[in-house]
Amino acid sequence: MYNYCNEKKSVVERIWRIDRMKWKKWLALLMAAVMTLSMAACTKDAGSAGSAGTEGGSNESSGEKDTLVLGTSADFAPYEYHKMIDGKDTILGFDVALARQIAEDMGKELVIKDMEFGNLITELNNGTVDLLAAGLSPTEERKQQVDFSEPYYFGEQSIIIREEDADKYKSADDFEGASIAAQVNSIQEGIVKEQFPKANLVSLPKLPDEIMSLTTGKVDGVVVEVAVAEGFIAQNPGLMIADIEVPYDATGSCIAVKKGNTELLEQINKTIAEVKENGKMDEFIKEAGAQAEY
């Protein structure tokens, strides 16, 4: 007798086996496709990562870059200072002009990083910046930490006082018990200690803070370079340069680079020699003084 149920069951089993084989085949194809796409994506990502360093004109993959990063403290006009130009905060000054000339001679774009004066050498040695231009004097202590260029400017030191105290302070000895401000980690700190030993040194991070302390009576004097002092006095009636000689063995202002960076140092010295010889340095100083805001 024909067993219809068994025959139907057999047909169903064959169909199921065929469908299962097809399903396995399609699953294998699908997995292969996914793996192919994944590998392609990884290859693309790797290619993108490898080319990221060259986008924007950078040549860091070959050990070069198209920028020269300057570290400065832009509160020291006319060396470096902030000024609004066409609604944009811009850092100017003859230090900046010199650094821009160095970058131009190297075929690079200058990038400026403004920071507190006391942090400059640390940031240079950390690799945050390539060079420092901030009215730096090559003291023996600093020479232990960085390499210096040839000097590009020599300036005299002075002490600013209030006009009302002109008769009170006529010599260094007159500052006995008084307070004199100087910028943190500056040569002026040393000048106060050496030339005004009877005064109390007040170290402040920024020069405008020193001037504010003087005008508000918190300190009695501020030791600063003559060119810088003249600018602040012009903007702050009631202040004057005291008629007191402030002796200092001037070593000039120099640019600092990381120790051992002889290639950059040679280029800097080359540019300094050129701008001093062709008169550009004098132009930088004159223009910076005319544009400065204190």
Image: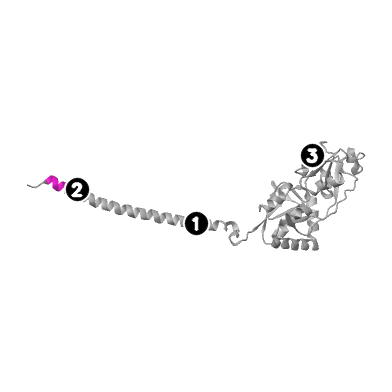
Per the model, the C-alpha gap separating discs 3 and 1 is 55 Å
Residue at x-position 40% and y-position 56%: 36
Q: Position of residue 291 (x, y in %)?
A: 78, 50
User: Sequence order check: which comes first, mark 3 or mark 1?
Assistant: 1
Per the model, the C-alpha gap separating discs 2 and 1 is 50 Å
Q: Position of residue 215 (x, y in %)?
A: 82, 38
Residue 11 in the magenta stretch? The answer is yes
Q: Is residue 270 visible?
A: yes
Which type of secondary structure does the marked residue at label 2 adopt?
A: helix
Residue type at mark 3: give it: Met
Q: Position of residue 14 (x, y in %)?
A: 20, 51
1 or 101: which is nearer to us?
1
Residue type at mark 2: give it: Val
84 or 158: which is nearer to us?
158
Which type of secondary structure does the marked residue at label 3 adopt?
A: helix
Label 1 CA crowd tier, 10 Å (few <14, some 14–19, many 20+): few
Which type of secondary structure does the marked residue at label 1 adopt?
A: helix
The magenta segment? 4-13
- The residue beneath circle 3 is 212
- The residue beneath circle 1 is 46
- The residue beneath circle 2 is 12
Residue 97 in the magenta stretch? The answer is no
Q: Is residue 83 visible?
A: no
145 or 157: which is nearer to us?
145
User: Sequence order check: which comes first, mark 2 or mark 1?
Assistant: 2
Residue type at mark 1: give it: Ala
User: Sequence order check: which comes first, mark 2 or mark 3?
Assistant: 2
Residue at x-position 83% and y-position 50%: 227
Vertical position of residue 270 compared to residue 156: above or below: below
Q: Position of residue 222 (x, y in %)?
A: 83, 43
268 or 88: which is nearer to us?
268
